[in-house]
Amino acid sequence: MSESTIKPPKKYTGPVKWMRTHLFSTWYNTLLTLVVGYVLITNVGPLLNWLLFDATFQGAGPEDCVGEGACWLFINQRLNFFIYGFYPDELQWRVDVMFALLAVAFVPQFIERFPGRKWLGIFGMTGLPLIGYILIPGGILGLEAVESSKWGGLMLTLILAYIGILASLPIGVLLALGRRSDMPIIQGLCVVFIEVWRAVPLITVLFMASVMLPLFLPEGMSFEKLVRALIGITLWQSAYMAEVIRGGLQAIPRGQYEAAGALGLGYWRKMGLVILPQALKLVIPGIVNTFIALFKDTTLVLIIGLFDILGTVQSTIADPAWQNVAIEGYVFVAFCFWVFCFGISRYSQNLERKLDTSHKT
Amino acid sequence: MGTTMTQHPESKDSQAEKKPGIIRVEGMHKWYGDFHVLKDLNLAVDQGERIVICGPSGSGKSTFIRCINRLEEHQQGRIIVDDVELTDDVRHIDSVRREVGMVFQHFNLFPHLTVLENCCLSPIWVRKVPRREAEAAAMEYLERVKIPDQATKYPGQLSGGQQQRVAIARALCMKPKIMLFDEPTSALDPEMIKEVLDVMVELAGSGMTMICVTHEMGFAKTVADRVIFMDGGEIVEEAPPSEFFSNPREARTQKFLQQIL
Ligand SMILES: Nc1ncnc2c1ncn2[C@@H]1O[C@H](COP(=O)(O)OP(=O)(O)OP(=O)(O)O)[C@@H](O)[C@H]1O
Ligand SMILES: [Mg+2]
């Protein structure tokens, strides 16, 4: 094979040339550049001043927050409450262990070629929730029990989101398969389930879970409020998930079903080995969208008296000892949500790239 | 491990016991809604026989062979494959599908699996062959269709002809007694048709029972034991290729042959 000596024409991309073609190519482009530049210069400076340069990070109490900038001291001092809620101080190591395990399971997912990252991910979806189920409530294996009413803050947000995400995916898959089933009874049940849950606002579901569910349960059977909220969130979310996945199932050509059938694969193997891997891959963006929405929707548990991260911050803002810290509080909450949701989004993009075997050109 | 082209596991047993009537279709009818697609089909195929089905578009050829592994359901009459009658009983359907391989016009490879995984999937999950054994067997079949070097690629990276050969290897990996082909070459560019036909001719030489829907009349002449002509959902004529091509009895057959030859 002879190597071609002709190189593709080089595009000159010096900074001046770049600016001229991208920022000042026409008079309206120039105008727009100047306006945006003005807005940036007049706003970024003060914003940075407020966020960092004039901000108070350290001190003993509210009286130290006197500067012009943000009072991060407030977050700093109440961080324990924002993360653990009312979880007893001396038992917080149990939550810390879970945070550490969460990091061990999922941080490697962002590192290409991390040894055994697949197994860590599988652990994150199986072993981790089991350990959490024992460690966080306690009450067995000599661990002191901590009632769920004491859980709160970031920890509660993560528990709600994690279990909601983990449970809604398989339930959503089953509902989606059921909705496309040949069996009229199963199909009917799935359609009714999906259409009912999807048409009800999550707030209503949560109210019903906390107020009405106990009325329907048999005598002597009761769940804690948190469990009821979790069931509500999960079922509500699985209805959405089912429709996202159904979209993927519909995109798989009939030939795939037929080829799998002709090879003698039964229904569950056909679905599990051939159809679902392709369908789920197709709808990763939709699934992740649903996950992110769920993650943020968990804050609605506020209205049934559970203190997630937003709830803990909000109740502290109302503390008369601290004044004018509302903005800092909300910025902090927004930042926490952003970190996790952005992480989910990045991970899904990694996954999509890794699973792409279509070789489209 | 390489096998030579002349010795294949199937060839031995098929020489040993040529089972008559491995496929028996008796008075079979099928409707799509009110549309009568297949009308009173009767066919008996012996083990090792090679049947070519041809006929104009829409005559029900695909529907017919898809009934043989129950990708389509028939409503009247009987289909018996290797002594198992196809009914609603899922166990019967499963056991027939294990013995009947099928190759489709559009290949229908699984795009999320490599060539080797495509071939091993069913042996591992349906026949419960250990993975290592299944892979070794799959490599032999890939060698037989002359693409062992593509084993780790994904279907999307192969040409149409290569994909169709993988599809044939995938079906053979289940060690089927019968192979069904539904226009395996009609989605291919002309230069790839030959490579697929060569594989099919070789397979026919090994004693496999085959039913091929195809318009490749050269293939029919060299390989087929019988040619079946279908039109309007009926079997119009059935004859050995020499007779079928040189001396067709029915007017409809003559007209069809004039058009395609
Ligand atoms: N799922 C279906 N529902 C209703 N009618 C169908 C369906 N599939 C096929 N048909 C009709 O049944 C008839 C036979 O179709 P079939 O695909 O078996 O024809 P064919 O002989 O294979 O044709 P071709 O050479 O074009 O592949 C056609 O008229 C077709 O329109
Ligand atoms: Mg057809």
Image (tube, coloured by chain):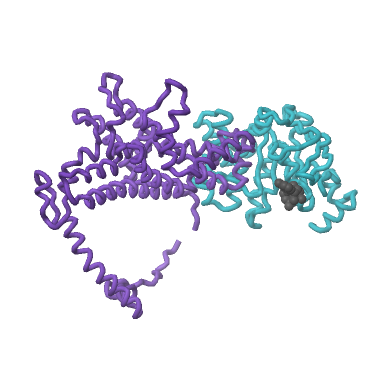
Chain colours: A purple, B cyan
Residue at 29% over, 21% down: A139
Judge by depth and name the residue closer to the eye, A313 or A263: A313
Task: Work out whether residue B215 can be spotted.
Answer: no
Number of labels in the image equals 0
In this view, the residue farthest toward the bottom is A27
| Image location of residue B13, percent across then percent down | 69, 28
| Image location of residue A349, percent across then percent down | 39, 50
Residue at 16% over, 42% down: A77
Q: Is residue B156 left or right of residue A128?
A: right
Residue at 57% over, 39% down: A192
Q: Is residue A317 above or below residue A305?
A: below
Residue at 47% over, 39% down: A238
Q: Is residue A121 left or right of residue A42?
A: right
Q: Is residue B189 above or below residue A232?
A: below
Task: Work out whether residue A147 can be spotted.
Answer: yes
Q: Is residue A222 left or right of residue B203?
A: left
Q: Is residue B111 above or below residue A148?
A: below
| Image location of residue A80, percent across then percent down | 20, 38
Q: Is residue A23 left or right of residue B184?
A: left
Judge by depth and name the residue closer to the eye, A122 or B64: A122
Question: In which quadrant is the N terminus of chain A drawn?
Answer: bottom left
Judge by depth and name the residue closer to the eye, A303 or A160: A303
| Image location of residue A153, percent across then percent down | 27, 39
Q: Quadrant of residue B181?
A: top right
Judge by depth and name the residue closer to the eye, B239 or A57: A57
